[in-house]
Image (cartoon, rainbow, N blue to C red):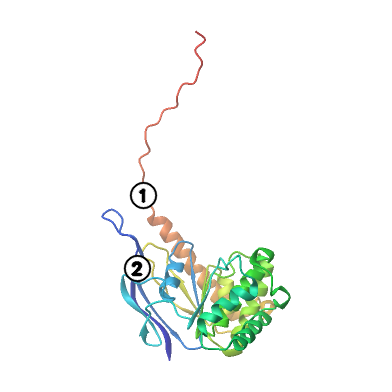
Amino acid sequence: MAILELKNIYKTYNPTKEYKGEILEDINLTIEEGEFVAIVGFSGSGKTTLVNLINGLLKPTEGEVLFKGKPVEGTSHERGVIFQNYSLLPWLTVYQNIDMAIQEAFPKSSKQEKDVRVKEQIEMVGLTHATNKRPKELSGGMRQRVSVARALGMNPEMIIMDEPLGALDALTRGNLQDEILKIWELNKRTALLITNDVDEALYMADRIIPLKPGPKASLGPEFKVNISRPRNKTELNDNADYKKTRNQIIEYLMDLGEKQAAESTTEYELPDIQPKDFRWDSK
């Protein structure tokens, strides 16, 4: 059963006579319930715009976004979003940042039920010791754990991750990849990962789809990841399917990059600027 459908999406920003502002074009995608899909793309290709269309922060210029067969009209706790920049309120503690989301998602629950849910999420991401700390007292990895706990605390039917680990160091990034996968394995929520890291996509997803460079970015061919779960990073280096799929995706992205560079032949006429004469006149 399809939980998310993007149909003929076309998106522009503030078009003018000189600038059409075309970001995305001909975006068609179907994600099945329980599937883990990764979209890999270049910086500036429109990945975040695509995420904002899916989570209801933006509306497409043309086409439609369907969630469980119904048009997406705005944000909903059914679609939990994990952002790259954490998006935590700095004056609230770990507990309060997560509690705020749970208050919104479960307004009819009792205070005790909400308290239990908040504490469960904090424990799940290993931050019980930091329950009363504020974001400035946390490392980048800990802040992202709070973001994960907040999104999952609303019990969403789909998790949307917009380059959630891009700002972290390699060790923290690897550890959080494992933690997100462990959490995902508990109930196999539908997941969409936006990333520019091919290895991260291969480690985490069932299906990988490149996003072509913009303007008018569109989705490329899909690559299926035929590697059983749970996956071991060390063993992946010797996995024939992993190496084959990785090479195919990287070659495809490199070809796209070379094609884009070849087409960027715009010439600019520089102004005729002459340096001023700053010699002092002794007279």
The residue tagged with tag 1: helix, strand or loop? Answer: loop
Q: Amino acid at mark 2?
A: Lys
Report whether 250 appears left or right of 23.
right
Q: Around disc 2, counting alpha carbons within 10 Å, would you say few (fewer than 14), some (14 to 19), or many (20 or more)? A: many
Q: Which residue is mark 2?
A: 11
Q: Residue furthest front?
A: 111
- What is the total number of numbered labels drawn onto the structure image? 2
Quarter holding residue 125: bottom right
Pointers 1 and 2 in contact (C-beta within 8 Å):
no
Q: Which residue is mark 1?
A: 266
Image location of residue 217, percent across then percent down = 39, 67
Residue closer to the observer: 238 or 100? 100
Q: Amino acid at mark 1?
A: Thr
Residue 177 in view in this figure: yes
Residue visible at 42% across and 76% down in the picture: 54
Image location of residue 247, percent across then percent down = 54, 72
Report whether 25 appears left or right of 162.
left
Residue closer to the observer: 241 or 137? 137
Between disc 1 and disc 2, whose residue precedes?
A: 2
Image location of residue 209, percent across then percent down = 46, 75
Report whether 8 appears left or right of 234.
left
Q: Is residue 37 above or below residue 261?
A: below
Q: Residue furthest top?
A: 283
Quarter holding residue 263: bottom left
Q: Quadrant of the N terminus?
A: bottom left
The residue tagged with tag 2: helix, strand or loop? Answer: strand
Residue closer to the observer: 78 or 25? 78
Could you give the CA–CA distance between mark 1 and mark 2, rounded to whole angstroms? 24 Å
Q: Residue furthest right?
A: 129
